[in-house]
């Protein structure tokens, strides 16, 4: 799907924009259930971690399968993009391959967690690739706290 700026984006540009290196197969459709059916466990993990990070209420599984890609988005392009909403947007750049593709280094970033798995500067969040081995529930909870923190620096 293309947004108004011509960027390759899956979902709706909103509060948290995830950047990944490769898009899924969309042959079954562009909703979460169809993506998981067409792409298997790899994309189930990605969408599950995304849902766990952003769900406000209810079960994250229901949010993943229902509203996740109606309310959030995933970008596969090589530059950070503006959400066109006029609202604050977190640019979640997942995996070192994505950091490098976007020309982002850790210079000036602050470690979000004690294990230094996630880093932030203003509204840019750098994390490991969203896979359960690299992205345990403890890291998800730490990022959820960071996302909800009202006085975090905005860059």
Image: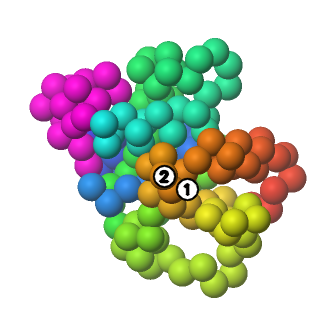
Label 1: how many residues lie within 10 Å, few (<14), some (14-19) or many (20+)? Answer: many
Answer above or below: position of 58 versus 92. above
Q: Nearer the viewer, residue 152 or 106?
A: 106
Answer above or below: position of 2 versus 35. below
Query: Which residue is labeled 1 in the image?
Result: 91
Q: Nearer the viewer, residue 126 or 132?
A: 132
Left or right side of 5 for 111: right
Query: Which residue is labeled 2 in the image?
Result: 133
Q: Residue furthest bottom?
A: 107
Magenta stretch in the rendered image: 23-40
- Residue 5 appearing in the image: no
Q: Residue at x 62, y 64 (%)?
A: 117
Q: Residue at x 59, y 17 (%)?
A: 59
| In magenta stretch: residue 49 | no
Location of residue 36 in the rendering, given as x and y in whole percent from the top left corner: 28, 30
Location of residue 8 in the rendering, given as x and y in whole percent from the top left corner: 29, 50
Location of residue 45 in the rendering, given as x and y in whole percent from the top left corner: 41, 39
Left or right side of 26 for 63: right
């Amino acid at each position: 799907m293309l947004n108004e700026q011509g960027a390759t984006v899956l979902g709706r540009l909103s509060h948290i924009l995830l950047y990944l290196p490769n898009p899924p197969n969309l042959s079954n459709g562009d909703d979460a259930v169809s993506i998981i059916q067409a792409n298997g466990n790899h994309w189930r993990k990605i969408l599950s971690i995304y849902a766990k990070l952003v769900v406000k209420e209810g079960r994250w599984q229901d949010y993943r399968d229902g509203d996740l890609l109606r309310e959030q988005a995933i970008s596969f392009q090589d530059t950070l993009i503006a959400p066109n909403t006029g609202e604050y947007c977190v640019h979640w750049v997942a995996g070192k391959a994505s950091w490098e593709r976007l020309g982002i280094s850790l210079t000036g970033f602050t470690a979000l967690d004690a294990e230094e798995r996630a880093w932030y500067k203003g509204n840019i969040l750098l994390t490991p690739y969203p896979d359960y081995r690299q992205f345990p529930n403890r890291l998800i909870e730490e990022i959820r706290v960071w996302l909800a923190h009202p006085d975090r620096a905005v860059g």
